[in-house]
Image (spheres, grey):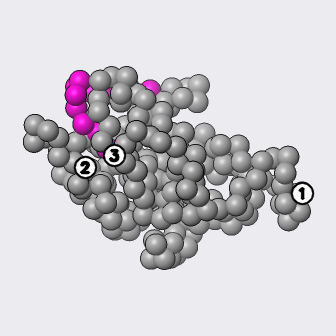
């Protein structure tokens, strides 16, 4: 874990300040994975480690490899790199214009096996949306994984195994219960909208 965190710090991808997370909670830190993943050799290395943790879930019952699926935008590079390392197909779900996710460009065959790959998980909302879409199209989700699990052990039950490279318990705060050092400090929303 310390090596991955060192890479986040080295690339400037672990931000410190006052942030509003997609969940609406506030935090002193933010993982901007795009800054880590912009360095292709680092992206290949980190996602290769995630692929290793997901490798045992790739075999389908008929010998085909599971397809990797990722939520846009943050998970696309992660999913592509994980799929490359696993030697399988990669697809993604994308934003629908109202804040949700939708499957637009790809086809899911009933019974096809999937692995969800994401960059950072806090409450698991985007992973759950992705799982729901795959299942609604007849796909079978066999595992999910993320580079960073910042849920503090509060990942919901996705109905499949979940793995990550880094597990953290960051301090988060509701907007009406900010600590003194964050009150009066402008908050930013650095994540994708």
Please give the range of residues in magenta: 102-115
Question: Residue 75 shows which numbered tag?
Answer: none
The verdict on residue 109 being magenta is yes
The answer to whether 131 is drawn above or below residue 26 in the figure is above
- Residue where numbered disc 2 is placed: 57
Across and down, in percent, residue 54 comes to 29, 55
Q: On the rendered structure, is 114 left or right of 3? A: left
Across and down, in percent, residue 2 comes to 48, 77
Quadrant showing the C terminus? top right
* Tags 2 and 3 touching, CB below 8 Å: yes
- Residue where numbered disc 1 is placed: 184
Disc 2 crowd, CA 10 A, few/some/many (<14, 14-19, 20+): some
Disc 1 crowd, CA 10 A, few/some/many (<14, 14-19, 20+): few
Q: On the rendered structure, is 10 left or right of 109? A: right
Q: Rounded to the nearest whole Å, what is the CA distance between mark 2 and mark 3?
A: 7 Å
Q: Rounded to the nearest whole Å, what is the CA distance between mark 3 and mark 1?
A: 42 Å
The answer to whether 136 is drawn above or below residue 156 in the figure is above
Residue positioned 57% across, 69% down in the render: 12
- Residue where numbered disc 3 is placed: 143
**Which residue is the extreme one toward the left?**
63
Residue positioned 70% across, 43% down in the render: 24
| Residue 114 seen anywhere in this rendered image of the structure | yes
Residue 7 or residue 51, whichever sits in front:
51
Judged by its main secondary structure, the magenta piece is loop
Q: Depth-wise, is mark 1 or mark 2 nearer the camera? A: 2
Figure label count:
3
């Amino acid at each position: 874990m310390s090596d991955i965190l060192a890479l986040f710090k080295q690339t400037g991808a672990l931000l410190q300040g006052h942030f509003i997370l997609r969940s609406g909670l506030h935090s002193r830190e933010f993982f901007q994975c795009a800054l880590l993943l912009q360095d292709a050799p680092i992206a290949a290395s980190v996602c290769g480690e995630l692929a290793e943790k997901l490798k045992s879930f790739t075999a389908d019952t008929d010998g085909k490899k599971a397809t990797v699926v990722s939520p846009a935008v943050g998970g696309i590079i992660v999913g592509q790199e994980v799929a490359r390392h696993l030697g399988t197909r990669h697809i993604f779900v994308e934003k629908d214009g109202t804040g949700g996710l939708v499957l637009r460009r790809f086809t899911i065959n009933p019974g096809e096996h999937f692995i969800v790959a994401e960059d950072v998980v806090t409450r698991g909302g985007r992973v759950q949306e992705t799982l729901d879409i795959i299942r609604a199209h007849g796909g079978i989700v066999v595992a999910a994984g993320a580079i960073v699990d910042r849920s503090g052990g509060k990942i919901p039950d996705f109905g499949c195994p979940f793995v990550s490279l880094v597990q953290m318990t960051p301090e988060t705060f509701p907007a009406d219960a900010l600590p003194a050092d964050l009150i009066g400090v402008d908050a930013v929303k650095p994540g994708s909208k």
